[in-house]
Image (tube, grey):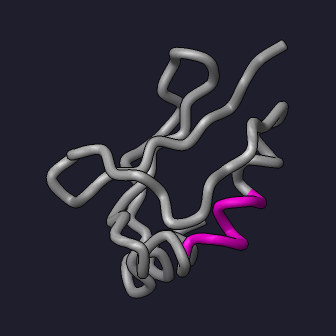
Amino acid sequence: MAAWTWRFEKSDGTEVSPAVQPEEFTTQGDAESWIGEHWKDLAEGGADQVTLSEDSTVIYGPMSLHAEEADAAATQD
């Protein structure tokens, strides 16, 4: 079974501890729902961007947690 995980980073790519501890996700949708619920707290806690991985494979990222950049990305879908 795949494990989906988020990596929390500063804007320079340095890994940081998340302000909200994530659970282990069994689907990409669950992981994305979680980040959608917690991105503001994560950003306020010091994370600038996140990267999503499935096991050891990076799926996408880094993705900004800053509202103006996140809003711009959301409108491109």
Q: Nearer the viewer, residue 77 or 37?
A: 37
Tell me if 4 is positioned left or right of 18 in this view: right
Q: Quadrant of the N terminus?
A: top right
Above or below 64: residue 55: above
Q: Residue at point 42% right, 81% down?
A: 44
Above or below 32: residue 4: above
Q: Nearer the viewer, residue 59 or 7?
A: 7
Q: Residue at point 48% right, 57% down?
A: 18
Query: Is residue 57 rendered magenta in the image?
Result: no
Residue 22, x across and y down, in percent: 66, 50
Residue range (magenta)? 33-39
Question: Please, which residue is most extreme toward the left here?
Answer: 12
Q: Residue at point 47% right, 75% down?
A: 70
Above or below 31: residue 27: above
Tell me if 15 is positioned left or right of 66 in this view: left
Residue 14, x across and y down, in percent: 21, 46
Q: Nearer the viewer, residue 12 or 73?
A: 12
Q: Main secondary structure of the magenta part?
A: helix
Q: Residue at point 54% right, 80% down?
A: 40
Residue 31, x across and y down, in percent: 72, 47
Tell me if 65 is positioned left or right of 54 in this view: left
Q: Nearer the viewer, residue 66 or 43?
A: 43
Question: Please, which residue is most extreme toward the bottom here?
Answer: 68
Number of numbered discs overlaid on the protein picture:
0
Q: Quadrant of the C terminus?
A: bottom right
